[in-house]
Image (cartoon, helix red, strand yellow):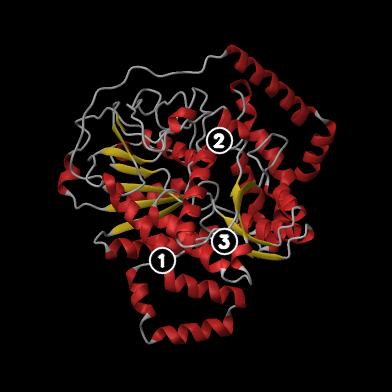
Amino acid sequence: MDATGALPQTKLSASNHDFSRSCPRVRSVVSVARRSSVEFQRPDKPRSRELLVVSSSSSANKGMAASGGSYLSGPVLKRNPVGQAFCAASVVGVGPYCEGFVDSHMHVTEEKVGVLLLNLGGPETLNDVQPFLFNLFADPDIIRLPRLFQFLQKPLAKLISVVRAPKSKEGYASIGGGSPLRKITDEQFFFEKTMFQFLRSAFFPLLVLCALLLLPEGNIFRLLRKSLQANGIKMALESKGLTANVYVGMRYWYPFTEEAILQIKKDKITKLVVLPLYPQFSISTTGSSLRVLQNIFSEDAYLSRLPIAVIQSWYQREGYINSMADLIGEELQKFAKPEEVMIFFSAHGVPLTYVEDAGDPYKDQMEECIYLIMQELKARGSYNDHTLAYQSRVGPVQWLKPYTDEVLVELGQKGVKSLLAVPVSFVSEHIETLEEIDMEYKELALESGIENWGRVPALGCTSSFITDLAEAVIEALPSAKSFSTTRSTSEEADHDFLSHAIKMIFGSVLAFILLLSPKVMTAFRNRLF
């Protein structure tokens, strides 16, 4: 690791996904964030680390490992010096490694494996909405300002959060007053084995009876689901012979990633697998979470020596594809004429500049993901028409097209009568599925002439899905083998004067509109005070 905290450049080789054609420049994996909400002790002396990148598509890479190194399954990322851009390619490469990396305590202590799950996070109460939005928009990977105007990041985030909070609160109120994302994530991956044993005991029926009498209807089903499936990945790993501690780190709300890292240190984990709960990689999701992680790891002596494995994307894994096909097939059978149903994949959008300027592989990975799911459905005898659209856009800039709301209207005008919505980029239910799809888009579809509406549930705790994630963790775990290579001395930087000038002009206009406009300032002042 160099003086800036950035990981060294990797050596690249092509893969079967061939993302490199859309990414002309590939650089070191994740640049370090300039700030962290948790202070860590800075190491006494500089260190370098090994970086090993492997594919996450299958078990073909079993046996490839590095003790004291970092596994990265999926795309390699590229950022410019401002920390604004990623470029992804499915590659295999190795970077430098410090032979003094593993100190004596690593050899004498018992191996303890940890799995860190990364997710977005969401407000759990209506009072959490505004601070959650501030955390979201204060992320430079969500709102990317030119270098000259990065000092406006937090003021702009404050402005947007207070203006958007009332409408967002209405959305969260319609789904029960908060996001279920944290609870579902906990359900997917947490619960000790003793609870599983308790469920089989004589006390469990009594617990259910008490819950039925005391809890609201919606909460009892949530409790039962949690009790029956909360072991998730932990139990799947144990069934495959791996005992691991599982941690949840949310990007924008509790429990924050920093909290999970503190617990990892407290538990003295000796090997760590980082598993973002996003099937496809994007700058704004996995990339943002990994940037925070690298910032923390680079400034802490213990963490910088910890062997880690990062599974960056897993959309092409057979278990994930089969699980999606299973859910789609089940929902298709609920229609009177399943063969006439249009399968409507709705993915969360990203600004177009992320893909065109920053090399974000999200669009390519999403399209490949849809292709693989449809191929699996065809292999099962389902030949339904399908389409892909992108939802949840905000602001005046262009996002990935086509937009979900516009496509729904077009399909209704074309005479489509039966539609099955598939939230393809979401593995847990939250506001984008429960409110945006189930309420807003369903209403729009029915108004546009679509008569039969269905929606595939998020994967959640689906057994085959959880089992496949457990297998991905096992495949990514480093073995005792170590590698040592030399550091690459070349690292590209963006020095396009015209592009930089345009960004400066755009930043000036943006600052004037947002900070000097009387209307905006009045609205901001009224809502803030």
Q: Secondary structure at mark 2?
A: loop
Residue underneath mark 1: 463
Q: Quadrant of residue 527?
A: top right
Q: Is residue 35 above or below residue 285?
A: above
> Where residue 411 sits in the image (x, y, percent)?
71, 53
Residue underneath mark 3: 180
Label at residue 321? none
- Alpha carbons under labels 1 and 3: distance apart: 20 Å
Q: Mark 2 belongs to which amino acid? A: Asp
> Where residue 20 sits in the image (x, y, percent)?
43, 29
Which quadrant is home to the N terminus? top left
Q: Name the residue rendered at 38%, 47% in the picture.
A: 274
Residue underneath mark 2: 141
Q: Is residue 220 left or right of residue 8?
A: right
- Alpha carbons under labels 2 and 3: distance apart: 24 Å
Along the line of sight, the residue nearer the viewer: 233 or 137 = 233
Q: Residues within 10 Å of mark 3 (few under 14, many from 20)?
A: many
Q: Residues within 10 Å of mark 2 (few under 14, many from 20)?
A: many
